[in-house]
Every structure is written in structure tokens, then in C-alpha cells.
Image (tube, helix red, strand yellow):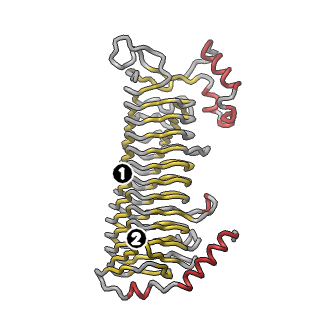
Amino acid sequence: MKPFMAFAAALFAAAAFAAPALQPLIDATPPGGTLKLAPGAYAGPARVTQAITLDGGGKAAIVGDGRGTVLTVNANGVSLRGLRIAGSGESHDAVDAGILLEGDGHTVENNVIEDVLFGIHLKRVNGSRIAGNQVTGKPLDLGMRGDAIRLWYSRDNRVDNNRFRRARDLTFANSPDNHVTGNRFVDGRYGMHVIFSPRLRVENNYLGHTGTGIIVLYSPDLLLRGNHVAHALTGGGAGIVFKESHDALVEGNEVLHCSVGLRVDAPPESVGKLTVRGNRFAHNIVGLFFYGEEGGHRFTDNRFENNLTTVGISAPGAGSANVWRNNYWDEYQGFDRDGDGIGDTPHEAYLFADRIWMETPMATFFRNSPVLEMLDFLERLAPFSSPHLVLRDPAPRMK
């Protein structure tokens, strides 16, 4: 165990030894009652098995002993508010967390949860609200952390205006019909990890300094609107990733300074399409990347600014069926002589020497090197092979 973790474990053990136990106070609270904790520390772990309100007033702390989950709820209609919770175990197999919820109709709001492996774990929970909490994970290497929030087989919940930091992911697994709004997450692996969770609404969240911003796997009918994703720069990551997840609306998002702004990966037989409109993709290494499919997605009214490569493809034919219209391209070289705000000629993007690194992964190391830049310039000047048309926007915006 690292020296810091050994010190923290000793500190929690000492606090738990000195603090009164919380469990007798919970057991003495009648169903439907409110347990208003006096300021101070209380020893965990503890378990709630009936519908009560546990209120810490922002001044009461529940301190675990460094083993297991600190506070477990096995009931319906429990409210947890104003608590400081710390000191979970470190077992991924047991999903050691600050709070474990089971049952329906809970409210978890305005709590501070820190030094925990997993923050808030919803296990078969429906119709609950998780709002205004602050969750900070244990100071572990990225691969050893747990999720700041984890929904598993849980639906119709609201996750609103929480602050997450230093965790692995925000995970939604087999959890349809949830709303995730106004949250902030920094310092993680995946900002949001969505798998087998259709009809999720993700709106107005900030995700920064994560390996990947939002990754959507096998989850159709999603809404991603008004999110800000920035600084997702790992080699295999992206700001937003869709894999075999169709019929989504991606609208009004801002994706900045990522390895790829939006990456779409679907099998050739996929029939569901994405609608991507009103987004801004700027300062990314690659703005959009299409892998292994013809596409047919609709891109309208988006802004593409200052990306090193605007659009990349895995091979000729990828993304060939996409529909483009009324997008703004900073690399457009046409004119607007009639002043209607639309370019007089279509915007077309071709692959010249770009094809080398897109079709030969080993060559990616040399991308944007002087040699490839010179080769690309020469091929545009006097092509010695037929360039590949990637996209055609017949009505590009000028502003």
C-alpha cells in the first residue's frame, strides 16, 4: 500500500474508533421519519432498510473503516442530503462505494463524497434523483479508479448538476430512459460510458481532461444536446464516439481540442442514422472520423474550425453516403457574390496524401510531419494518383 493510502486508512480507522456508530441512530428512526444528525463524525459502514430522511445539514460526516461500502440503502423512498461521506474500501469486485442505492424513488442531494473507490452506485434503481453532489475519488492511478457514478439496470432517473472529479467513468449500463443534465466531470478515463442504454438524454454537461468525452455503445435513440467536451486526447479516444448506436440526435454541442471530435463506427448493414446539427468542432486533431461504414448520417448547420484534419476515413467508401448541408467550413475557398450567406460553389473535401496515414495506421506517427506535408502539397499541385472525394456540401455557410 502506498504511504498516503496507509496514512488515510489509519486516519479513517482512528476516526471510526472515536466517532459514535451511526447504525443505532438509523435503526431508531421510524419509517417516514427524519434523522437530523448533529454536527460531527459518525462511524460507518451503515445500512438503511426503511423509508427515512437522513439529513446531515452539511456538517455531519459518515466515516467508513476503509472496507466495503460506507452507506447502503435497501429500501424505497429514502432521502440522503447534506452528508459528508468518506472512507470506502478498494475492491472493484465488490464495487465498494460511498453510497449504494437499491430500490426506487430515492433522493440523493447536496452531499460531499470523497476518498471512495466508486462514488454513487445505483443498482436496479428507478425513478430517483441524484442532484447537487460533489464526488471525488481516491488518489489512484487512472486504471485502478472506480466510477464516480454507476447506473446498472436502472431507469427513469435524473442525474443533475453534480460535480465529479478524479474517477474512472460516469457509467450507464443497461439503463434506459435516464436524464443526465448539467453535470461536470474532470480527470477521468471516459467522461460518460453508455452501453446498452437506449433513449438516454444527455444535456448541458461539461466533460474535460478525460481520455474520451462521451462513448456510446449499442445504445439507440440518444439525445446529446448542449454539452461541452474538451481535451480528450488519448490515442484511441475522441470527444464523442458512436459505435453501433443509431437514430441519435447530436445537437448544439461544442467539442474542442480532442484527438477526434466525433467518431462514428458502425457495421455496413447498420440502417439507423445520426442527425448531427448545430455543433461546433474546433481545434481537434481530426474533426470527424468515419470507420467501416457508408454512413447516411445527416450533418447540417455545424461549424468546423481550426481542425488539423477536418474529416478522416478508415478507407475509401467510409462515410460516402453521408448528407452534408449548410455547414461552415473554415477551409472553404469559394465566394458569396450574391450575399445570401451561402457559398456560390459546393465545398468538397478530397484526400490526397492524407490517405497514407488513414489507410496505413503505422504511418500515423508521421502525420503532419514536414515530409507528409510536402508530399500532400505536391499531390495537390500535380496529382500523381486520383484523389478520393470524402464529402460534398452543396450549400456551405460563409459565416
Local secondary structure at mark 1: strand
Local secondary structure at mark 2: strand
Residue 65 location (% of width, % of height): 56, 79
User: In the drawing, does residue 76 fall left or right of residue 355?
Assistant: left
Residue closest to the far left? 32
The residue at the point 43 percent across, 47 percent down is 245
Quadrant, the C terminus: top left
The residue at the point 57 percent across, 40 percent down is 259
Quadrant, the N terminus: bottom right
Tag in front: 2 or 1: 2
Residue 252's image quarter? top left
In three-dimensional space, the C-alpha distance between marks 2 and 1, rounded to whole angstroms, equals: 27 Å
The residue at the point 61 percent across, 13 percent down is 381
User: Residue 107: in sight, yes or no?
Assistant: yes
Could you say which disc has been placed on residue 201 in the image? 1
Q: Nearer the viewer, residue 254 or 323?
A: 254
Hey, what amino acid is under mark 2?
Answer: Gly
Circle 2 is placed at which residue position? 82
Q: Earlier in the sequence, mark 2 or mark 1?
A: 2
The residue at the point 61 percent across, 58 percent down is 142
How packed is label 1: few (under 14 Cα within 10 Å), some, or many (20 or more)?
Answer: some
Marks counted in the figure total 2
Residue 26 location (% of width, % of height): 39, 84
Q: Nearer the viewer, residue 71 or 110?
A: 110
How packed is label 2: few (under 14 Cα within 10 Å), some, or many (20 or more)?
Answer: many
Residue 277 location (% of width, % of height): 37, 35
Hey, what amino acid is under mark 1?
Answer: Arg
